[in-house]
Amino acid sequence: MLRSLAIRDFTIIDQLELDFSAGFSAITGETGAGKSIVIDALGLLLGDRADGTLVAQDRKRADLSARFTLTPGHPALHWLVDQSMDDEGLLLLRRAILAEGGSKAWINGQPATVGQLREIGSMVVEIHGQHEHQQLADSRFQRQWLDRHVDQKLLAAVAASAAQYHDHSTALDRLLARAGSADDRELLKFQLAELDTLDLAEGEIARLETRQRRLASVEELRAAYARALDVLDSDLHDGAVTQVHAARRALETLADREPALADVIEMIATAAVNLDEAGAELNRLNESLETDPQKLEQVDRRLTRAIELARKHRIEPEQLTEFRTEMADRLARIENFDSDRLAAEQRLDQAHQAWRKQSEKLHNAREKAAATLSDNVGRALAALGMTDAKLVFAIEFNADRVVSAGGADHVEIEFSANPGQSPKPLRRVASGGELSRLSLAMIIASSEPIAGLVRVFDEIDAGVGGETAHQVGAFLSQASRHGQAFCVTHLAQVAACADQQFRVVKQPGQASTHVSVETLSQEQRVTELARMLGSARSETSVRHARSMLEASHETKSPGNMSAP
């Protein structure tokens, strides 16, 4: 249940705080007073797109907040728990809209995204806009409205099978795009033969370059080894190894007199060991050196050939082995193309058959739902004064349709307003007033009791009047029995059915215009209803308004209309 709504610096509202009770609330006021601004503010709290122009003039931001209480078991409670935002049955939505652009949102005091506002908003509030009936002429909207009344698992299954079909179709397209010609096959075979002749191993280029440098520098290496060995342990003079060992022995004789020398002696001993090992390794390397021009020539030729092939394919020599693997894969794809294409086409055909099968199930479900909805809409239209009106669904199944998540049906609503006329496509035959009442009838026919749901109707009664308006008010009253209902209306017959009434007043000033909203007492409601009927100063209008309020207390049933 929506308990309160607070608005600050939003369009022409400076500051507004409204408290709500259970039942049906009507929002009334003069034309252009700004009644829909309150609904717009609520829509923004439910995730509608924000715009900096909505901030009041000369203000930095608009601040909106709404407080809801949730009944036990409400789906929003589970969502809040999953998001770690639960607060003992309370839901507080807040959104700040910045004048320079952008907005910030909070759910129960925690930062939230607009997507999260939209997600939880759909669980607690259902808004029907004043232009909703204009969408009825759109066949896509008609199908979506029908699909709200079929098993959602069927819709999900069709969508999943369509997605799988498109995945297989994309895979086949990629396979066809990669298909090579006979010339491509021969070229790849020739290039692979060149690489296979070289038979380059992984990492061999680096090893060849190292070996080439070593074979080309044998004399330089020998000279360097000799110089190093002479320094380390020369027969002609004391080398480094001899000197280090002498230093260690000199200190060891005094170690008992200076304990700190133990660490120094240890370090010198380690150095001696390292020098001994270094000398031994240099001797081994020196003995392994060999002058072999023939081996050097073989290495040079192999490196040169690798560089030539790399240059030919515009890659680095180190990439030749990876490149060879890629070319082998390409050749395999070309040689296996016929079998791969056949397998891909079979998978695509199987996916299409699966989509068609699921679409047939969805078609049958749509036919069944359409029959029930047509009957319910017919009864609702009769209750709204269109006793001879008839609505039917024309559902055409076409298995050759482009595969889509919506199935293989073309759905169109057909309508007849007068007896003796066969139903024809709605977009061609319905007037604006008929569309408005038909929209109401569809809402009535598809409404189900939903505990804790807040329903908002923004001037959906446009184009109706008289006894039909009474029926609309009765429906809205009944729609609030399991939750809450709000309606922005110009009709006194509708407002009289409300449990609570708010009047929106525009207050123009010299520099700016502001809007205020006041909760009406019983006597104030009589005055407001009289104004809506014609004149607040007319005794006839006042008596009529008072009788309407008294009658609304006696019955709030919409006759034989389907319960929301």
Image (tube, grey):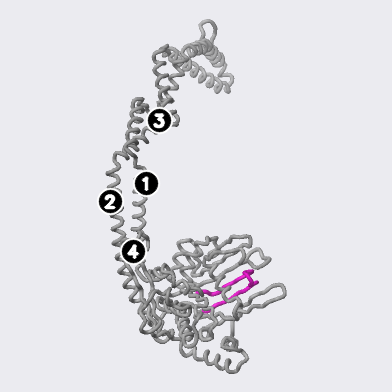
Q: Position of residue 451 (x, y in %)?
A: 43, 75
Disc 4 + disc 2, Cβ < 8 Å: no
Q: The residue tagged with tag 2: helix, strand or loop?
A: helix
Q: Position of residue 483 (x, y in %)?
A: 46, 77
Numbered marks: total: 4
Observer-nearest of 505 and 435: 435
Q: Earlier in the sequence, mark 3 or mark 1?
A: 1
Residue corresponding to mark 4: 408
Q: Write down the region rendered in magenta.
A: 1-21
Identify the residue at horizontal 43%, vertical 68% (top origin): 75
Q: Which residue is mark 3?
A: 320
- The residue carrying pointer 1 sits among few (fewer than 14), some (14 to 19) or many (20 or more) residues within 10 Å by Cα, namely few
Residue 172 image point, x, y percent: 34, 48
- The answer to the question of whether label 3 and label 4 lie on touching residues, with beta carbons closer than 8 A, is no
- Which comes sooner in the sequence, label 4 or label 2? 2
Q: Name the residue rendered at 45%, 64% in the picture.
A: 79
Q: Amino acid at mark 4?
A: Ala
Magenta segment's dominant SS is strand
Q: Pointer 2: what residue?
A: 346
Q: CA distance from mark 2 to mark 1?
A: 15 Å
For numbered disc 4, what is the local secondary structure? loop
Q: Amino acid at mark 1?
A: Arg
- Residue at screen point 52% across, 21% down: 266
Kindly report the distance in space between the C-alpha atoms of the residues bearing marks 3 and 2.
Answer: 37 Å
Marks 3/4: CA–CA distance: 51 Å
